[in-house]
Image (spheres, grey):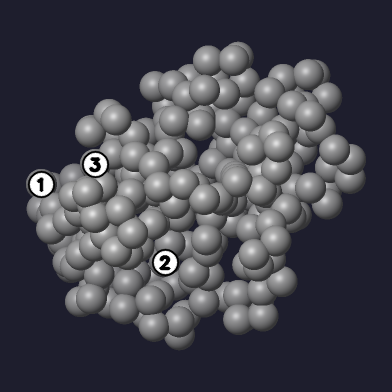
Amino acid sequence: AYACINKDSQIRLESSSGGMFTIFSQEIIKRKGIVFGARFNTDFSVVHDYTNRIDDLGEFRGSKYVQSKIGQTFKEAKRFLDQGEKVLFSGTPCQIAGLLSFLSKEYENLLCIDLICHGVPSPFLWNEYIKYREQEAQSNIKTVSFRNKNKGWKKYSLSINFKNGKEYIEDVYNDKYMKLFLSDVCLRESCYNCKFKTINRVADITLADFWAVENIYPDMFDDKGISLVLIHSEKG
């Protein structure tokens, strides 16, 4: 287990914790590989997608507290793996288990990264919340951040910028969506009986916020985000 930060302060600011997903992704892309992760699409649904460009990694950075649509990404990852390309696939523990089950054989050129998962609300609830905020602002959404650090890492906020210039920002304890999420009342049924959020992971690396790091490494804590990195395999 490691406590890690990205030395690029801007990337760390834009990341949910310490910015380590970007570090791993940059390394894979530098080796001519492909990175799979979750991003927003044009209507702010969360979808899995891939890139081989470092400039695109900003779209995949940061937590998205909603179930992502896997789409064809398992098939696309297999195609790249069969071609001998290096692939980093990131997702929730159940998504990584699903990918490995789909592939049905080991690939030395595949690196899997999961996260310590709280569970995921349904896309329906997230879409209803988006409609609610757009009606309130009388404008379409321009950007969303679930983990705005304007008040620090520990007291993060959900922030939404609208195309008419308005901004909604509310801390995690007062935003309606985040209150539902963190109180565990809106997660998918499967999340309450998850078989994959265990100590023994099928992923090579697990990423998370290193909460309470100030109790272990007080000199490291600056309230800007620290990543917990758990290594599960030689490849990881």
Q: Mark 3 or mark 2, which has the lower sequence index?
A: 3
Q: Amino acid at mark 1?
A: Gly
- Residue 13, labelled with which disc? 3
Q: In which quadrant of the rendered view does residue 95 lie?
A: bottom right
Residue contact at pointers 3 and 1, CB within 8 angstroms: no
- Residue 165, labelled with which disc? 1
Q: Amino acid at mark 2?
A: Trp
Residue, far right: 105
Q: Mark 3 or mark 1, which has the lower sequence index?
A: 3
Q: Quadrant of the C terminus?
A: top right
Q: CA distance from mark 2 to mark 1?
A: 22 Å
Disc 3 secondary structure class: helix
Q: Nearer the viewer, residue 189 or 117?
A: 117
Q: Amino acid at mark 3?
A: Leu
In this image, 125 relative to 137: left or right? right
Query: Residue shown at 67%/29% (left/top)?
Result: 87
Nearer to us of marks 3 and 2 is: 3
Q: Mark 2 or mark 1, which has the lower sequence index?
A: 2
Nearer to us of marks 3 and 1 is: 3
In this image, 159 relative to 18: left or right? left
Residue 96 pos. (x, y %):
68, 51
Q: Nearer the viewer, residue 62 or 232?
A: 232
Query: Residue shown at 62%/20% (left/top)?
Result: 33
Query: Residue shown at 53%/15% (left/top)?
Result: 30
Q: In which quadrant of the rendered view does residue 185 lie?
A: bottom left
